[in-house]
Image (cartoon, rainbow, N blue to C red):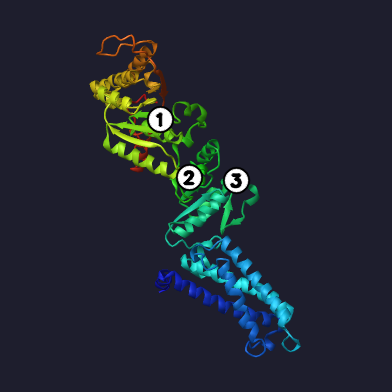
């Protein structure tokens, strides 16, 4: 019955809702003024508004309602009634009370004397009634009627929702609690915070526990999950917290990072699994944009293997450095479509004017590579196209050699012929004293670049020697090691195995 009524009220047109609000405020203004007389004169001298002070009871809503409209009280959405709306009520009621006080001072006479304290009583009573009604209706529309059980400290009612504790009682933690209550997908039951000054206090209706009392919190609240609401903390601090929480039977998730929240890319209630990078024994080293943009900003950049794990991340970072054109080359239609869609959305969101060009093709096709680089006048090439999975290349040696070795030779020679300024090979730490086919192919690719970079006028494979074919390309390479979470790597595999109940498997008994 209550839920049906709530649904019908929510479904009303906005205009009808405003009419109901105005009518309710008129009644509350009259009631507040009448009670102001009662508080001042007592119940024995009960005021009949039509007897002596009819003009005052007519003037009160006439003075108040226009001010309520002016301060935007009827534009606020009741379900999201917050501090701003409360401040607007205080301002509007205060100004209407001052106007009413001036009217009483000017128009009262000895026969219709209005005690001055009546105006003061009217001020605080109308503020309590009008603000209180809106707070009550907010709770009603959120489904938290009858004392708003979820907001009452230590309440046991959870309506069958999953119980969660919030680690971090700061601004992010309180925003997360508000978001969870409005979304009604989880039931926050407690805060956990290191700050001794707020230990055992109540914030947003939730008790704050010290980290060492987590087990007691679990026993008393039945929490099943902990949400980390510490977006501005360092990676080292997050690692300490995660290590401490390992000993408890709780699923741990996190709110997004501070920069993502500030940029508006995500909301505070967009919960994420714990980043695997938080478990590393070191902090990430931030890149220096002034060094990176030298080969990118205002230039045409080509990324081979743009849809792969490393290639796609390269594209994301390159986009932010504002090249003139970003060419995405990949042999997989789906991967190319995915990264193009993502980059287009990010470019629109960041108001970037980068031209994105998706190109379906393979690094095995030397003529096409040369045509691309000459047509678009490519300045920088990031060569990330390669078969990288060790077991897969072991089973497909010929394909691995053709793609990783010949593909690199094709791309590098095309860069030479097209006069590309910079060529960066994405290599791997497995190229150091290689013990498998994949590492060997990447080592050969490195040797090819080293050989080409030493030649002043290199001879292109299949062409005649040409002394005018001057090497204008600077060849560089970077070795990636243990790329966390890349497609087909051990981290996604472990995630799937854990989610399916285990066990975790490795490829060899002596593997580390």
Q: Tell me which label, 2 or 3, sits earlier in the chain.
A: 3
User: Is residue 502 among what the camera can see?
Assistant: no
Residue under numbered circle 1: 483
Q: How many marks do you count on the picture?
A: 3
Rendered position, 129 above or below 295: below
**What residue sits 41% from the left and 71% below the top?**
12
Q: Tell me which label, 1 or 3, sits earlier in the chain.
A: 3
Q: Nearer the viewer, residue 502 or 401?
A: 401
Distance, label 1 to label 2, CA atoms, is 21 Å
Secondary structure category for the residue under label 2: loop
Left or right: residue 300 versus residue 103 is left
Residue 256 is labelled as 2
Q: Report x, y in % for residue 271.
A: 45, 48
Q: Report x, y in % for residue 238.
A: 52, 39
In the rendered view of the protein, which quadrant contains the N terminus? bottom left
**What residue sits 52% from the left and 50% below the top?**
166
Secondary structure category for the residue under label 1: loop
Marks 1 and 3 in Cβ contact (< 8 Å):
no
In which quarter of the view is residue 339 placed? top left
Q: Report x, y in % for residue 202.
A: 60, 57
Choose mark 2 or mark 3, whichever is in front: 2
Residue under numbered circle 3: 194
Secondary structure category for the residue under label 3: loop
């Amino acid at each position: 019955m209550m839920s049906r009524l709530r649904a019908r009220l929510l479904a009303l047109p906005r205009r009808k809702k405003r009419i109901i609000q105005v009518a309710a405020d008129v009644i509350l203004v009259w009631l507040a003024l009448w009670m102001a007389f009662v508080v001042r004169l007592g119940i024995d001298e009960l005021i009949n508004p039509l007897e002596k002070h009819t003009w005052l009871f007519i003037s009160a809503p006439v003075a108040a309602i226009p001010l309520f409209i002016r301060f935007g009280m009827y534009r606020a959405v009741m379900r999201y009634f917050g501090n701003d709306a409360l401040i607007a009520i205080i301002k509007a009621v205060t100004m209407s009370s001052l106007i009413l006080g001036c009217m009483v001072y000017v128009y009262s006479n000895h026969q219709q004397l209005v005690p001055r304290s009546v105006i003061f009583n009217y001020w605080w009573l109308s503020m309590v009634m009008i603000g209180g009604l809106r707070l009550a209706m907010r709770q009603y529309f959120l489904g938290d009627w009858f004392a708003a059980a979820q907001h009452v400290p230590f309440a046991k009612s959870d309506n069958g929702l999953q119980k969660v504790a919030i680690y971090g009682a700061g601004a992010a933690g309180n925003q997360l609690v508000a978001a969870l209550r409005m979304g009604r997908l989880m039931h926050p039951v407690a805060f956990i915070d290191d700050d001794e000054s707020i230990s055992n206090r109540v914030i947003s209706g939730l008790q704050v526990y010290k980290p060492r009392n987590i087990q007691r919190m679990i026993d008393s609240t039945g929490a099943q999950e902990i949400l980390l609401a510490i977006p501005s903390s360092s990676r080292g601090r997050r690692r300490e917290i995660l290590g401490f929480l390992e000993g408890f039977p709780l699923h741990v998730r996190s709110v997004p990072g501070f920069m993502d929240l500030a940029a508006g890319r995500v909301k505070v209630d967009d919960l994420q699994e714990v980043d695997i990078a938080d478990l590393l024994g070191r902090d990430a080293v931030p890149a220096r944009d002034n060094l990176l943009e030298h080969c990118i900003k205002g230039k045409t950049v080509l990324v081979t293997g743009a849809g792969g794990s490393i290639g796609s991340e390269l594209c994301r970072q390159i986009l932010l450095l504002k090249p003139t054109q970003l060419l995405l080359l990949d042999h997989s239609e789906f991967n190319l479509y995915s990264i193009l869609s993502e980059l287009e959305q990010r470019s629109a969101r960041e108001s970037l004017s980068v031209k994105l060009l998706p190109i379906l093709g393979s690094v095995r096709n030397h003529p096409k590579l040369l045509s691309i680089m000459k047509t678009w006048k490519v300045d920088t090439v990031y060569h990330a196209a390669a078969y990288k999975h060790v077991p897969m290349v072991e089973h497909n040696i010929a394909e691995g050699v053709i793609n990783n070795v010949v593909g690199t030779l094709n791309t590098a020679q095309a860069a030479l012929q097209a006069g590309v300024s910079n060529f960066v090979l994405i290599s791997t730490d497995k190229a150091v004293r290689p013990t498998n086919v994949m590492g060997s192919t990447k080592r050969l690719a490195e040797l090819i670049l080293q050989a080409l970079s030493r030649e002043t006028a290199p001879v292109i494979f299949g062409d005649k020697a040409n002394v005018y074919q001057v090497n204008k390309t600077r060849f560089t390479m970077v070795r990636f090691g243990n790329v966390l979470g890349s497609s087909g790597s051990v981290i996604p595999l472990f995630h799937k195995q854990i989610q399916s109940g285990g066990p975790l498997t490795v490829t060899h008994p002596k593997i580390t």
